[in-house]
Image: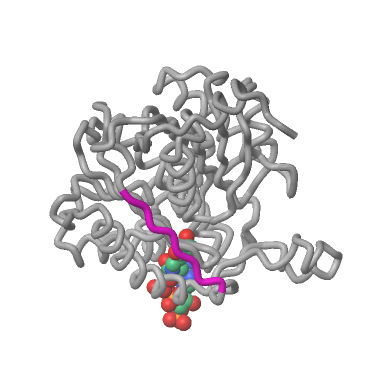
Amino acid sequence: MSVPTETASALYTPTSFRHAGIAGLGMCVPAQVVTNDEIAKRVETTDEWIATRTGIRERRVTTPEEASSDLALVACRQALEDAKIAPEELDLVLCATATGDYVWPATACILQDALGAKKAGAFDLSAACSGFCYGLATAAGFIQSGMMRNILVVGVDTLTKHLNWEDRTTCILFGDGAGAAVLTPCSNEEGILSSVLRADGGGLEAVWLPAGGTRTPITPNVLESRTNCMKMQGKDVYRFAVEVVPSIIQEVLDRACLKPSDIDLLVMHQANIRILQSAAERFGISMDKVAVNVDRYGNTSAASVPLALRECADEKRLHRGDIVVTVGFGAGLTWGANVIRWNRDY
Ligand code: UT7
């Protein structure tokens, strides 16, 4: 079928390569605070053990009525307002989550509808705790190619719903939250300068949700054995993180022709303060250049990086021209990083 010339050129006019920058940020955490002492009433642990081994002091936990999209929607609205972009101007809603409202369809579609993003596509991206960094790279690719202009990337997880609250090796670690960013075209000197994405599916069982998918559907036996809850080999994940985080930071900086000393703000996935300290030490970066929210929110999976970005914006730690490095790592196994030259002042 021949396409009328006018339509074809409107659809396919080649646009010059342009970078994608973060024009707005938003966040949301549930109101309910659960302290280490409260967890210590349910399992054999102590505030001292949790705080020393992980840096976590408390986390936010959703009520049974609150789902991922409820948190994500608040974060998305704040990000759009911050970017001064109307929902109708969005080309894509990209939701990074491992804990969508339903098995299918995508939580991104729920957000698209609730926001009134009438001209946007919508899909979910499944890369667990690396999801937001994967999402930034994906959105940057769409914008750089000229295929899209305005993209909303939201990282949301409510992993507390998938925890066995009698398993002290996992239930102490996680919290719920959402963080969102609006990406728009910017000058080629600014915005997302480089991204690196990696995976090692051989590490599937290091941290995973064994049942509830098509391989192992939910049955009475599954519920009995609690395989519908998260399982984790904590030490293996720790070793993996300590190895891959510095190497991906070096690689993503190399791609942007920058050095560790150029970093103004390092925003890593918040799994354990010791992982953050180890990476900072490796590059001689002082902790005042490292974003930390693990103490207040625990491990919020795909939300941890955008939550930290929004808080850094509120604390006026993000300035135009700053080099910001974001790093995610987690289930899959997956890991990813982005170098951003910040293109607006907060
Ligand atoms: O987002 C990515 C997903 N997850 C992660 O990134 C997690 C990465 N891993 C970690 O952060 C750490 O491995 C943990 C915080 C999970 C565990 O810390 P660890 O220093 O590796 O402790 P461990 O597993 O080696 O356990 C040490 C001891 C053990 O007792 P024994 O065998 O030495 O007698 C555990 O049974 O601590 C015990 N233990 C606990 N004690 C009190 C394990 N969990 C607890 C607990 N409270 N909650």
Q: Which residue sits furthest right?
A: 220
Residue at point 44% right, 31% down? 182
The residue stretch that appears in magenta: 194-201
338 with respect to 90 (left or right): left
- Check if residue 197 falls in the magenta segment: yes
- State how the image is colored: one colour
The structure residue drawn at horizontal position 56% and vertical position 33%, both measured from the top left corner, is: 92
x and y percentages locating residue 95 in the rendered image: 57, 41
Examine the rendered structure and indicate whether residue 74 appears above or below residue 17.
above
Q: State the residue in front, 106 or 74.
A: 106
Residue appearing at x 75%, y 46% in the figure: 104
| Nearer to us in this view, 34 or 290 | 290
> Where 256 sits versus 191, above or below?
below
- Look at the picture and state if 9 lies above or below 298: above
Residue 43 in which image quadrant: bottom right
Residue 329's image quarter?
bottom left
Query: Residue at point 38% right, 30% down?
Result: 185
Percent position (x, y) of residue 145? 45, 40
- Measuring from the top left, give residue 25's x and y in whole percent: 40, 31
Q: Dominant secondary structure of the magenta stretch?
A: strand
Q: Is residue 181 visible?
A: yes
In the image: residue 342, left or right of residue 80: left
Residue 229 pos. (x, y %): 67, 62
In what quadrant does ligand 1 lie?
bottom left
Q: Is residue 115 visible?
A: no
The front one of 121 and 4 is 4
Which is more toward the observer, 25 or 183?
183
Q: Is residue 215 magenta?
A: no
Quarter of the image that includes the C terminus: top left
